[in-house]
Image (tube, helix red, strand yellow):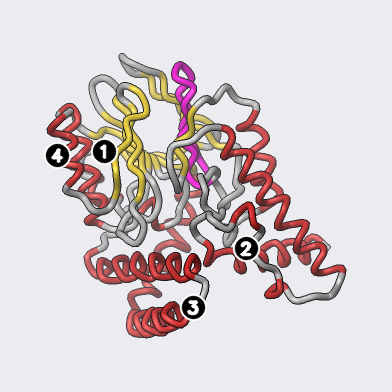
Amino acid sequence: MGNAIKVFTESRHFTLDTVTEGVYAAIAAPGTGSVGNAAIIDLGDSLLVIDTFNTIEAAEDLLKVARSLNGKQVSYVLNTHWHGDHTSGNQVFASEAAIISTKITYDIMADFGRKRLNQHLADSELIYQGLDEEEEQAKQEKNQKLKRDMQWDIASNREYMNMLPQLDYTLPALTFDKELTIHSGTRTVQILTFGGGHTESDAFVYLPEEKIAVTGDLVLSKHHPVLMNSNPKEWLNILEKLARMEIKTIIPGHGEVCSKQQLHEVKKYKQAITALVEESAENKESLEAITVPEAYQDWCFTNYFQLNLNRIYDFMEKKG
């Protein structure tokens, strides 16, 4: 384990947390090429990696630390959903691992994801210009918490853009619809989906013996959930199902290793901001007048709060 820590500490992209024997959480360092968390699970004769970060360099560091833990090969990689901070490092693992996702996630990556990447390449000058403008806005921001989150976001986006010309957009090779089980010599690993909440399709990993869940962005710890591609109602339904499972420990999509308490906090967050949007609509007030509730003022991703309010409002409008 000493060598593993040495290799790991040379990565600026994440810190490694031993959750239990053979289960490790790679917790993203803000403002780097990771953005979202990843996880490594020892299957006895090989390894499962869950999510692959936002850049090639971060993914290469993840592969190095995975191999250094016990010298085993990464045989499987799961993409919990299609967002780039969970899939952009796929190419690093493709030569030795079978990359897994739901069928819906695969379809989104094969179509929209590939088109989105090509658009980013075509518009790279405009994107860099936009990042420069955002940097100036961040310098002028008076709210120090929001300023810090904006700066972290800009730094990570610059790393992504700098990497983009070297990116070989790598799709999953195996797909499933509801459940896939890996039977290994040391543990049973269930890969499940309850549908789409954070995105159109979200998968998670459950270790029934250890009562550990690796949830992707269905659960975040002390981070504003990102509602951009979400179905808020279905997300709550999925969280209700997760809450009924025997789970003691959660490796979330963002933030530190946590418990069901943070799952319930995400539920309360969604309910709270939905109530704020409903109240604002009833009073015909601007969403921009809504400030971050005190309970969430120390959470990361503050820069997504207004976007979340807009998403809730749009969702309410579509539902009539």
Residue 60 drawn at (x, y percent): 20, 49
> In terms of secondary structure, where does tag 4 sit?
helix
Quarter assignment of residue 285: bottom right
Q: Which stretch appears magenta?
A: 202-217
Answer with left or right where residue 92 lies relative to residue 177. left
Front disc: 4 or 1: 4
Alpha carbon of mark 4 to alpha carbon of mark 2: how far?
39 Å
Q: Is residue 212 magenta?
A: yes
**Residue indicated by mark 4:** 6
Task: Look at mark 3 in the image and give the residue it sits on.
Answer: 141
**Distance between the alpha carbons at the discs numbered 3 and 4:** 38 Å
Q: Nearer the viewer, mark 1 or mark 3?
A: 3
Q: CA distance from mark 2 to mark 3?
A: 20 Å
Mark 1 and mark 2: span between their CA atoms?
Answer: 35 Å
The tag earlier along the polypeptide, 1 or 2, is: 1
Residue matched to label 1: 97
Residue at position x 29%, y 66% in the image? 159
199 is within the stretch colored magenta: no
Q: Specify few, some or many for label 3: CA neighbours under 10 Å numbering under 14, 14-19, or 20 or more.
A: some
Q: Tell me which label, 1 or 3, sits earlier in the chain.
A: 1
Which residue does the numbered mark 2 point to in the structure image? 308
Mark nearest the camera among 1 and 2 is 2
Image depth: mark 3 or mark 4 in front = 3
- Whether 115 is drawn above or below 125: the answer is above
Report if residue 114 is visible in the image: yes
Which quadrant of the figure contains the C terminus?
bottom right
